[in-house]
Image (cartoon, helix red, strand yellow):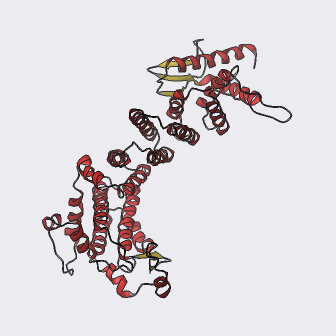
Amino acid sequence: MDEDKFALVEKIIVDIENVMMKNAELCAFDIVPVETNFQNKSPVLYLENCLGLESWCVKHVYMYCYSQIMDKYFAKPKRKALKVSAANADRLVSLINVTLLLNPELNSLWNKRRELVLKAFLEKSSELQFTKLVLSRKPKCSDAFAYRRWFLDLIFTDESMHNDDIQNLVDEELHVCELTSDSSPNNYHSWNHRMWFLNKLKTVKQFDINLKYIEEYEFSEKWMSKHISDYTCFHYRQFCIKNIFCIDNSSWCKFSNIVGINFRKSLVEIVASNIPQDVTIQASQEDLLSYTEDNLVDMLLCGSFKNCNCIVDNVLICRKLEILFHELFITNELMIFYKYHETLWYHRRFVIHEIIAIMYEYFGVVRQNSALVKKSCKKCNSDDLREKQPKIVRYDSNRIYFSVLFNVLICHEKKFSEERKIDGDNYADRHVKYMKFVEGLNNVM
């Protein structure tokens, strides 16, 4: 590189650093397609709190910065790396900033950045903002998300954080996840990072994680209605559902009020309209709405005959069924309105699997190698029962297959699949095959 190009690249690096230092709240960075420098001005652009770099200089700037870092600050055969000190730290930070903005998928540079943070050569207050800037251009950069998780771990080790600081951090992190998810479809990196962050919040004592699961459940419904083919959000919603299963009673009381949904209504509507005629129990929606949780579960599952003495929590089972049948109700509406979307069928499989799992758990069985076997209770330690009778007898399986809940579920799925087939949805056949050969219901479907 000749002296003129060298001087130009150095000026570009300085200009980028100046923009980043003067504008701490930069919201985006991108490469602007410009083939030549016909106006003879700086290729560093700044407009409406966004940073840009003209494309004609990207190759030269990147190669210069990358070679400078590798030649001086990384060890090579027969040559030691330059030790980072207060005298050269600012120069190294500038080179790393520019290099990662242009190509963030360099794990070695992110590791060098971690080293600079631990040695206090980088201001911690600006690191989350820098990774947000990187992700604005590369929303699926796994290295940037990994670095962000590492840095958040450092932040959460500080036990002196106030509630306001925690709430601001939570709002900002979820906002970054939403921006990256909107920018790139099927962004598993973003949604997995969001799940990691919520799991991390479980360790924060002064934070109400149950309330956040409820808010995220409501958020996911709004988001997936706008991105109907993006399974990543459905996967995140499933994560929220499983965590809502475990919320305490006080949080459950807030749940329906926050989301504004009567979950019992979705359950009884499907149950009342799909009770088989040969079942002796017949109940209207009004009757089912008046049932207590214990009465409703006893009616749907016809009583338990588990082989252990553990107390069955009918309230928890009823709550799980209410949420899952509400999901079934939502997917019914979405599949009618948004036709032929495979993503919706995948989410439906999750719901069906969870409902069947609740029944198996209630009756104390588990499916192994395409056969139902009695599940040994870890609390009661019934090893002798498992050895004497590993497989369930026909009477036991009939108790499952003759239960109201099982018949309602099968009747509803048959009816809905037939309607979708008539409407020309080829995924309905695949759903029936899933029920038969994956869930093992080939004898009833």
User: In which quadrant will I find the N terminus?
Assistant: top right
Q: Looking at the image, can residue 426 be seen?
A: no
Looking at the picture, how far across and down is residue 311, in whole percent?
Answer: 33, 72
Looking at the picture, how far across and down is residue 408, in whole percent?
Answer: 27, 72
Task: Look at the picture and state if 211 lies above or below 284.
Answer: above
- Residue at image x 55%, y 29%? 124
60 relative to 16 in the view: left or right: right
Q: Tell how many labels.
A: 0
Give the residue furthest to the right.
78
User: In which quadrant will I find the C terminus?
Assistant: bottom left
Residues 29 and 88: in front is 88
- Residue at image x 58%, y 19%? 17
Q: Quadrant of residue 118?
A: top right
Residues 91 and 276: in front is 91
Looking at the picture, how far across and down is residue 3, in whole percent?
Answer: 75, 14
- Residue at image x 48%, y 88%? 388
- Residue at image x 40%, y 87%? 393
Looking at the picture, how far across and down is residue 39, in whole percent?
Answer: 57, 12
Task: Look at the picture and state if 73 lies above or below 431.
Answer: above
Q: Looking at the image, can residue 41 be seen?
A: yes
Task: Look at the picture and state if 354 lies above or below 51.
Answer: below
Q: Quadrant of residue 298?
A: bottom left
Q: Quadrant of residue 79?
A: top right
Give the residue furthest to the top.
40
